[in-house]
Structures are given as structure tokens and as C-alpha cells.
């Protein structure tokens, strides 16, 4: 048997999966996730969102469109945390009603939902 030295591009230790680990689960390795790692990350996102925004705050979407925050939380039509915003201009898609679920109320075409990471607090936008 001939061994050929190859240059490694990483200084991290080489970790080979154990045969026991692979055979003990029917879930592909790429899709495995431990509960301990997933739970704190999810809670952190929710806590960060709740501490950053309050319903009634003035916000900006991608720094371009402005409006008033009317809803923060989970929605039935997508995964993740979303902000329901009443836009200042009729550039939205609805009035707060999506798939027959009323999340908030605003004028027609003034409502929009965006992922919370696309929303920032407008300058002097915090309500008291």
C-alpha cells in the first residue's frame, strides 16, 4: 500500500463520523440537528425581535419604505418571524388580512408582511 501526503487546507482536527452514529439514525447527516443547539437559537431570535420592536413603532423596510408596525410574530403563510406593517403609501399587498386571517387592520394596499430582519426602527421611531 502506498501512502501519498496531501496538503490540508484547514488546521482543524480531522473528524471522521463514527460508524455507530451513521447507522443509528435514518436522518441524513446533513439534516441532523441537536435540540440543545436549535432551542437557544430560536429563543434568541424571538427575544431579540420582541426587544427591538413594539407594535406602534415607526419602522423602515430595507431602509426604503416607511410605515407603522402593526404586528410582530409568527404567521400561517410562512415560517419565521414576520413584521406586519401599515405603509405610509399604498405600496402594500393587503389590508392586514392574509388567507382569511386578520393579523391587523389598515387601509387597502397599505399592509405588508416582511421578515423581521428586513425591518429597522425609523429614526426617532420608538413609541412611548
Image (tube, rainbow, N blue to C red):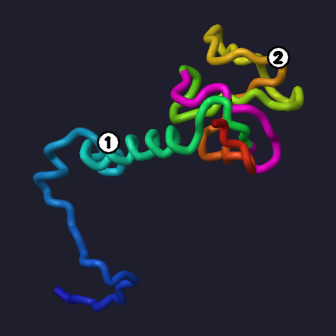
Q: Observer-nearest residue: 36 or 55?
A: 55
Q: Residues within 10 Å of mark 2 (few under 14, many from 20)?
A: some
Which circle's residue, 2 or 1, is located before the other in the chain? 1
Q: Write down the residue under mark 2.
A: 107
**At 53% across and 29% down in the image, what residue appears?**
73
Name above or below for residue 16 compared with residue 2: above
Q: Is residue 90 magenta?
A: no
Q: In x, y percent, where is residue 21? A: 15, 52
Q: In x, y percent, where is residue 82? A: 59, 33
Q: In x, y percent, where is residue 34? A: 26, 46
Q: Is residue 74 magenta?
A: yes
**At 75% across and 50% down in the image, what residue appears?**
123
Taking the image as shown, residue 26 lies to the left or right of residue 55, namely left
Name above or below for residue 33 compared with residue 97: below
Q: Write down the residue under mark 1.
A: 39
On residue 54, the disc is none
Numbered range of the magenta stretch: 60-75
Q: Secondary structure at mark 2?
A: loop
Amino acid at each position: 500500500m502506498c501512502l501519498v501526503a496531501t496538503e490540508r487546507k484547514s488546521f482543524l482536527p480531522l473528524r471522521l463520523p463514527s460508524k455507530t452514529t451513521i447507522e443509528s439514525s435514518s436522518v441524513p447527516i446533513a439534516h441532523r440537528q441537536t435540540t440543545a443547539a436549535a432551542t437557544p437559537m430560536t429563543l434568541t431570535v424571538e427575544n431579540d425581535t420582541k426587544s427591538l420592536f413594539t407594535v406602534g413603532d415607526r419602522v423602515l423596510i430595507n431602509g426604503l419604505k416607511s410605515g407603522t408596525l402593526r404586528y410582530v410574530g409568527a404567521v400561517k403563510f410562512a415560517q419565521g418571524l414576520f413584521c406586519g406593517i401599515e405603509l405610509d403609501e399604498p405600496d402594500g399587498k393587503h389590508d392586514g388580512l392574509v388567507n382569511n386571517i386578520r393579523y391587523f387592520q389598515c387601509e387597502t394596499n397599505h399592509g405588508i408582511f416582511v421578515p423581521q430582519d428586513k425591518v429597522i426602527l425609523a429614526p426617532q421611531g420608538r413609541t412611548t
